[in-house]
Amino acid sequence: MRFVQCACHQAMGGSFFANAAMSPADAGGASKPVPASAGPVDRAILEELAAASRILADQGVVDAFGHVSMRHPVSPNRFLMSRSLAPALVTADDIMEFDLECEACESKGRSGFLERFIHGEIYKANPAVNSVVHSHSPSVIPFGLTSVPLRAMYHNAAFLAAGAPVFDIRDKFGATDMLVGNHQKGEELAKIMGESPVILMRAHGSVATGPSLSIAVFRAVYTEVNCRLQLQTTMLAAGGAINALDLEEGPKADAVNITSASRAWDLWKRRVQ
Ligand SMILES: [Zn+2]
């Protein structure tokens, strides 16, 4: 067994060593070489990603399950994500670095999330995505189970004006455990998602993405809120018209949201510090 030193942690002042013989994060998979780290990441960025995880828990988007990641700030072929852990408990020390094959650059004996393939394959397929949130947020689930299209009920959810595709894992993979636990399933999800900011997963959950960490979190939170509102609106409308944002209004309102999402981020972050 040989050991290689990880530049990422050299720069953080530690003397950490990565096991180069295999990747323990790849639970159940064949042993693969450990990819090289893309280099050190500012502690402040790791803190922001950990805060995002706790924000999503505080906002009711994730519970014991679910995860958020961000593309490496320097290398587009790497992404950062917590070790497998309840989102409310994540701190900067839990953040791991992965390549786009979802192999950990340095595991230090930690395990990655089984469904990290959702993240790696979306980063691989869509260079415009810099952050991914996967959740099982409850109000979203009904829209993946029915043929009722998701629509943008108000301006905060303008990114949903064009609706959201549905990934039905059964279509290609038959009866499964419903989890996106390998490359093939992640690749299929990313293909169906295309450039949509959100995708629904039948009988499982959803994924929200964004050009930045704060936008992906914003979209994950407001997807959950929007679904709650759409369920209420549908009951109130009682079969009548629902005058949601249209395809022209959506991009206009979303452009404003992208510039003002930091206000929500600052508020939500304060609650989890
Ligand atoms: Zn899941």
Image (cartoon, rainbow, N blue to C red):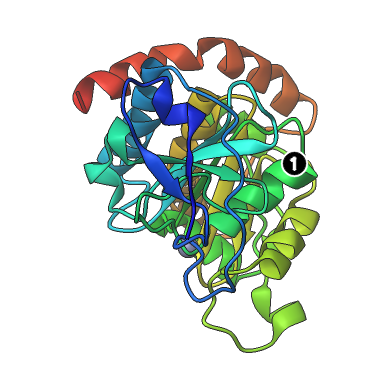
- In the depicted view, which residue is nearer to us: 262 or 173? 173
The three-letter amino acid code for the residue at tag 1 is: Ala
- In the depicted view, which residue is nearer to us: 90 or 1? 1
Q: Which residue is mark 1?
A: 162
Residue 6 lies, in percent from the top left, at 48, 35
Choose top left, top right, bottom left or bottom right for residue 39. Answer: top right
Q: Quadrant of the C terminus?
A: top left
At horizontal 29% and vertical 35% (from top left) the residue drawn is: 93
Residue 126 lies, in percent from the top left, at 77, 40
Residue 127 versus residue 261 in the image, above or below: below
At horizontal 58% and vertical 29% (from top left) the residue drawn is: 72
Q: Is residue 190 left or right of residue 78?
A: right
> Disc count in the image?
1
Q: Is residue 191 left or right of residue 111?
A: right
- In the depicted view, which residue is nearer to us: 187 or 223? 187
- In the depicted view, which residue is nearer to us: 77 or 217? 77
Choose top left, top right, bottom left or bottom right for residue 64. Answer: bottom left
Residue 130 lies, in percent from the top left, at 63, 30
Circle 1: element type: loop
Q: Residue furthest bottom?
A: 175
* Residue 144 in sight: yes
At horizontal 39% and vertical 58% (from top left) the residue drawn is: 111
Choose top left, top right, bottom left or bottom right for residue 60. Answer: top left
Residue 62 lies, in percent from the top left, at 35, 50
At horizontal 47% and vertical 70% (from top left) the residue drawn is: 27
* Residue 163 in sight: no
Q: Is residue 126 left or right of residue 178?
A: right
